[in-house]
Amino acid sequence: MGTNSLKYILFLTGSGILVYDDISTESKGLLSLIGLILMVIGIYLISKGIGEKPKVDPYAVQSYDEEE
């Protein structure tokens, strides 16, 4: 199990804990906090892997055939 699946497991576990705590009748503040922390860490790890956008000019001529 690599780090790629770990970030999705953290995100889904945190989301599941938040949903469970919201649905349950005995709401525990600590459980919500743990779920929120796990979800935020998962989102951070997912967004960290996105990287920078390539610097491509969409209006630049890609080939000489496009000019004609």
Image: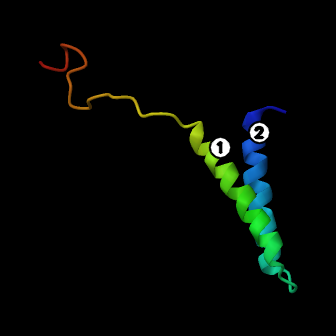
Image-quadrant location for residue 60: top left
Residue 3: horizontal and vertical position, in percent? 75, 34
Above or below, 63 against 13 in this view is above
Image-quadrant location for residue 53: top left
User: Going by the image, does 1 lie left or right of 40?
Assistant: right
Q: Which residue occupies 54% across, 37% down?
A: 50
Q: Residue furthest top?
A: 64
Residue 32: horizontal and vertical position, in percent? 77, 71
How far, Cα to Cα, is label 2 from label 1?
Answer: 10 Å
Q: Which residue occupies 79% across, 31% down?
A: 2
Above or below, 15 against 67 in this view is below
User: Going by the image, does 40 lie left or right of 23?
Assistant: left
Residue located beneath label 2 in the image? 5
Residue 34: horizontal and vertical position, in percent? 79, 64
* Amino acid type, residue under disc 1 in the picture: Leu
* Amino acid type, residue under disc 2 in the picture: Ser
Q: Quadrant of the C terminus?
A: top left
Q: Which residue occupies 71% across, 64% down?
A: 36
User: Going by the image, does 8 lie left or right of 68?
Assistant: right
Marker disc for residue 45: 1
Q: Are marks 2 and 1 in contact (CB under 8 Å)?
A: no
Above or below, 68 against 15 in this view is above
